[in-house]
Image (cartoon, grey):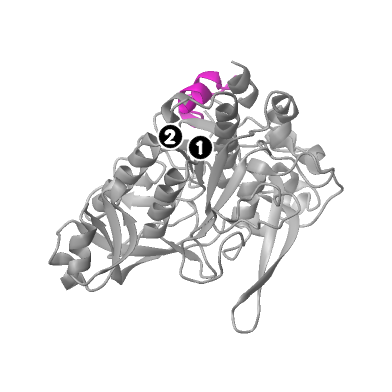
Amino acid sequence: MRQQPRRAFLKTSGALLGGLFAGSTVVAAEQSDRFVVETDDVAGLQRAGLNVVHDLTVADVAVVEGTEDDVSSVTSSYAPDIEVSLKDPDVNETAPQETRDEPGYEIQWDKQSQQIPQVHSVTRGEGTRVAVIDSGVAADHPDLEHAVNEDLSRNFTDDGFGAGVPAGGSHGTHVAGIIASNDANDEGVVGSAPGTEIVDCRVFSTAPGASFADILAAVVYSAAIDCDAANLSLGAYPLPRQSLREFYGKVLNSTMTYANSQGTVLVISAGNDAADLQHDKNFISLPNEGAQAFSVAATGPKGYAFDAGDAEQGPKSPAFYTNYGTNAIDIAAPGGDAVLSAIESHPDSWYYDLVYNTVSTPRFNGRGDYTRAEHDYGWKAGTSMAAPQVAAAVALVRSVDPDLSADDVKSRLKRTASVPVDYDKTYYGAGYLDPLAAVTG
């Protein structure tokens, strides 16, 4: 088994938690006037003088604003909402974002490995819907303007910038492009399910953080509008298994179970900590270890466009950063990899091992108002990039078999996946994603 670099645990104390966008360097602070409450009685909360921000009582959860004294007068089952700060992985910071010769499929090793053109001879994902719970999707990106449903898209933050905009950064647009970039416009790149409809559920704003409560609300909303999949390329790790954190896991599980029961497959990145989640007894990773989560590990090539020597590996090999664990991972998919030493030795080609797709950079005026986005194409890596490959596959399967339940879809994807030769389930769960087998088998 290949060696993983030793991970450095995040130091947690008091109100600090691990971060959103798993594998990032983060801190998280509890809010003093916003609370997540386990309840099915919104009226009782309102009578106590609390402002109900998100009514999620279909999943026995609500999010309120008010004093802790008012909350505790109604229920003892609550916890402060949390805001999480983050820093993107360094490998993405060094990758360029620039347009290459079009069409970009020639450098999309991820789509080539999944035989996406052959998949499109069966289905392009028509008649399906995928929510992207992320930093915002640029609805006017040339490769996504055909796919984003702006009427259904929602801004779950309080920044007032609206939805269908990448106000929280380029991450969400890259995720959406992996799912649905237009394969029929003779420009740009290819998405796995360009026929699906994308709903932007923005939970990140200009500050590098997101509200746990807003993420719960976005999950419930995705189920309410009949999304076939909701992609969550985010996560918190390491969280202590005991103490107050049990509450967050509890309300997350009830929310995720509700969404799954409504037919929405929750596709979630496994995290980028090179952590053995199966044997980590003291900590837990959420939401990918939550109830009904379809947890995705990442793979990628080493030396796709340069000579990596003895380090060379194909696109199905585990990425150096991916979290793993046979019973913690459901499936693996292309997320990008890197020979870190090649960043200096091959400055013009190392990043081809990452995932290439749509990006949009937000622009703001001097008052801090969102004004526009600059659209482009660029490389990113992470389990954040692996998860949308699977969310797209959910859409593809639902397109050919619309009556399948969420559990049926997950079973189909796992049954048609396979573990590459020379590896075992530790890094793959059921195996490496195979969309073609899933839509034909």
Distance between mark 1 and mark 2 Cα atoms: 7 Å
The residue nearer to you, when weighing 46 against 256, is 46
The residue nearer to you, when weighing 377 against 21, is 377
Badge 1 vs badge 2, beta-carbon distance below 8 Å: yes
Which residue is painted at 18% across and 68% down in the image?
A: 47
Q: Is residue 425 magenta?
A: yes
Q: Is residue 284 magenta?
A: no
Which residue is painted at 22% across and 59% down in the image?
A: 78
**Is residue 86 depicted above or below 144 in this figure?**
below
User: Can you identify the residue that label 2 sits on?
Assistant: 263
> Residue 75's image quarter?
bottom left
Which residue is painted at 54% across and 55% down in the image?
A: 153
Q: Residue furthest right?
A: 101
> Which amino acid type is marked by label 2?
Gly
Regarding mark 1 in the picture, which secondary structure is present there? Answer: loop
**Is residue 136 depicted above or below 191 in this figure?**
below
Q: Decide which of tag 1 and tag 2 comes sooner along the chain.
A: 1
Q: Position of residue 70 (x, y in %)?
A: 17, 71
Left or right: 385 in relation to 69: right
Regarding mark 2 in the picture, which secondary structure is present there? Answer: loop
- Can residue 290 be seen in this snapshot? no
Please identify the quadrant where the C terminus is shown: top right
**Is residue 356 depicted above or below 262 in this figure?**
below
